[in-house]
Amino acid sequence: MSLAFIFPGQGSQTVGMGVDLAETFSAAREVFQEVDDALGQKLFALMRDGPETDLTLTENAQPALMAVSLAVSRVLEKEFGVGVDRAAFVAGHSLGEYSALAAAGAISLADTARLLKLRGQAMQRAVPVGEGAMASLIGPKTDVALAEAAAAAGAEIGVCVVANDNNQGNVVISGAKAAVDRAIEKAKELGARAIPLNVSAPFHCPLMQPAADEMAQALAAATIISPRAPLVANVTARPVHDPEEIRRLLVEQVTGRVRWRESVAWLVETGGVTRFAEAGSGKVLSGMAKRIAPDAEATPLNTPADLEAFAKSL
């Protein structure tokens, strides 16, 4: 069995996430405390008690989701003896790429928390609220070609690109609001359902260039070492372990496409992965993995019972 750890992105946050881990394991409590200390913020209290509107803010959701993912991976290692080095690869969806790198020891937990806080703030600053939009194109006919055709219609009046290629039947477009609205009309003509997403900024499109510039500066100053398991990067869907290449791809990722479908396909077909373990909040990526690679096993690791069962299964 060849294993890959995968780490969720924004949208998987819920009030109460990580609480049962903190109540059960000191290793989880230490992670949440370390993140609070790094940010000078009571982030875990917000995760535990809400309000949801504050937790959903990009600058809070990003480090909070990473904290839950790192609590899972640290508990697995400290309590059950299952380190990330048991995996052939790691991968993460958008901000989850930072969680993957932190879990694999490439970036310290404190630095990862600060980088994600900044990334959330920079993405919010890049485009005034209401000027950008994202939409999910779904349905059996939806693939990258359909999404690119819809985005091209929108691009006639403004920035509009394919932002996330999640899986066959689920592709996200991003850009200027009027352009995305036009692309939604075109997608419906082409036979897809189009659902506007409740996001505060148009992620993974060229409008995020100011945020990419801010992240380039911050990442240049951050210490990055080779991860204990290679990272399959969002923008290339290929493994990377060179720290300078990781730095470059994290900057590119702010404006670039999340090639999740291609990443999972590469992991299975070339990387030989037969099992995915989703470390963190929710089970969105497990569902995507099953749709992309029906023969692979995908296990969400949320609760203490999940972790125990997973460790025993190894």
Image: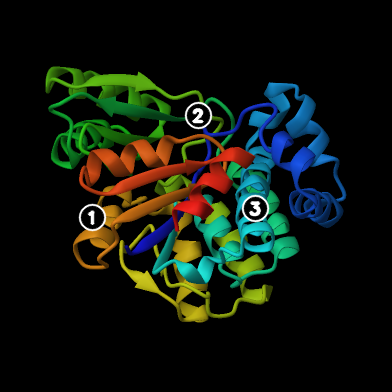
Element under disc 1: helix
**Pointer 2 and pointer 3: residues touching (CB < 8 Å)?**
no
**Mark 3 Cα shell of 10 Å, populated few (<14), some (14-19), many (≥20):** many
Q: Is residue 160 above or below residue 269?
A: above
Observer-nearest of 277 and 6: 277
In the rendered structure, the answer to whether residue 194 lies left or right of residue 188 reads right
Q: Secondary structure at mark 2?
A: loop
Of mark 2 and mark 3, the one earlier in the sequence is 3
Amino acid identity at mark 3? Leu
Closer to us: 295 or 185: 295
Residue at 35 percent across and 20 percent down: it is 195
The vertical placement of 216 against 288, above or below, is below
Mark 3 and mark 1: Cα distance apart in space: 27 Å
Q: Position of residue 144 (x, y in %)?
A: 19, 41
| Image quadrant where one finds the N terminus | bottom left
The amino acid type, in three-letter code, at marker 1 is Ala
Within-10-Å neighbours for mark 2: few <14, some 14–19, many 20+: few
Of residues 5 and 65, the one drawn nearer to the viewer in this rendering: 5
Mark 1 lies on residue = 265
The answer to which image quadrant residue 89 occupies is: bottom left
